[in-house]
Amino acid sequence: MFQEEGSSSVTSSPLQMFPMMSLPPSLTMSPYPWLKDLKPEERGLYLIHLLVTCANHVSQGSFENANIALDQISHLASPNGDTMQRIASYFSEALADRILRTWPGIYKAFRSTKISFLSEEILVRKMFSDFLPFTKVASVIANQAIIEAMEGEKMVHLIDLNAADPAQWRALIQDLRARPEGPPHLRITGIHHRKEVLDHMARILTQEAEKLDVPFQFNPIVCKLENLEFENLRVKTGEALAISSFTQLHTLLAPNNDPRNGSHLQREMLDKDNESGSSSPPSSSSARIDSFISGLWGLSPKIMVVTEQDSDHNGKGLMERLSGALYFYAALFDCLESSLPRESLERLKMEKMVLGEEIKNIIACEGVERKERHEKLEKWSQRFDFCGFANVPLSYYAMLQAKRLMQGFNCEGYNIKDENGCVVICWQDRPLFSVSAWRYRR
């Protein structure tokens, strides 16, 4: 819609070619007068090459050369420019953040006065849901799967592993009210680490249930997901259980807290790309997520709907993660390019506070701090099957609702694909989010 001349994107360019591009004879030239003569497409390709070069220096601990590359990037990148310029701004910031983390004292000093406002974070997340279809499409599919699984049930218990937005469950209450057999008694258990978020959700959903005369109870659990005690979920005999997880399970792929000091862990950051072997997560993180999923299985859910980013950002090495993340986030930045003008303040906030923070976590962090460990649907399917879950194919009607909702965003770039009974939401041909449904298997 707002695609502007000169926009360039990594989504249509093979990343493998970038390391083969030659740098100018001297990287030490300043202020790089030749950079201003680059055409937009050339600039985009060169920015990617500089990011790959910089990341390679960072992974090897060659910070002086990384600094030179970052300086060149600063002359080309811009958070207000075209797609590639904006992406480069956030990836270069992430690489610089990774370098700073090797000096914990300096890093902590830079962050000592940082202030975050919960209300602003919630508002920006809502913008992301309003301007891009991923959240709403996933919610529609999840609600339809829950409605179909709960047909005829008189007592329904829904566990939301990230109870941050009441909109999805307001719609579910309305759908349950419209059942021919009448609404069930609905109990929602919401998990979130901020009490005020849960209080807001309880107030909104209680009002909606009272207005529609739906028997309702809200059970808040204030904790981080990794600290959840399953007995606090209070699943009762006779309840039909549904579980919803929206982009949460990947955060449990991080290993358990390491008792070693921070400087030791920071030194490890320099060794990640020198390790041999596969890119699969270490056994400690596999055991952690498997234990959690097995705990969910032990609750005997009738339906569990899981939405996850459909990309592989959980490799051990920085270079591997950079490659996957460039493709994935270039597609998301393209989505925003097609929806909002470049000068949009809303767009800038979403790119910085949502996408930029995810990029920073993937590139700059290691160990327990690295939460954005996205993996492909195939890996999640293998995990769920291993832990005793059976796949529930999403219905034709769920797909139909999702496609109708997608059309309302008035952009031809989005599409939905069926993948073995699951749904993959794409931008062009790039998979971005997956939605899958599962049930307890004896």
Image (cartoon, rainbow, N blue to C red):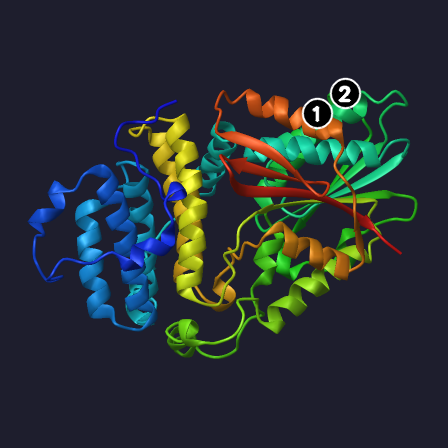
5, 368: nearer the viewer:
5
Which three-letter amino acid code belongs to the residue tagged 1?
A: Glu
Count residues near mark 2 (Cα–Cα under 10 Å), then give few for <14, some for 14-19, many for 20+: some
Disc 1 designates what residue?
Answer: 208
* Displayed quadrant of residue 146: top right
User: Are discs 2 and 1 less than 8 Å apart at CB?
Assistant: yes
* Residue 203 in sight: no
Left or right of 278 in this view: 72: left
Residue 274 against residue 134 in the figure, above or below? below
Q: Give the percent coordinates (x, y) of residue 75.
A: 17, 48
Q: Position of residue 333 (x, y in %)?
A: 39, 38
In x, y percent, where is residue 204? Answer: 65, 30
Residue type, label 2? Leu
Name the one closer to the observer, 442 or 225: 442
Q: Find numbered disc 2 in the image and state the secondary structure of the residue it sits on.
A: helix
Count of marks overlaid on the render: 2
Q: Which residue is mark 2?
A: 212
Name the foreground residue: 325 vs 250.
325
- Kindly identify the residue that appears in the image at 41 percent across and 26 percent down: 339
Q: Is residue 244 above or below residue 363?
A: above
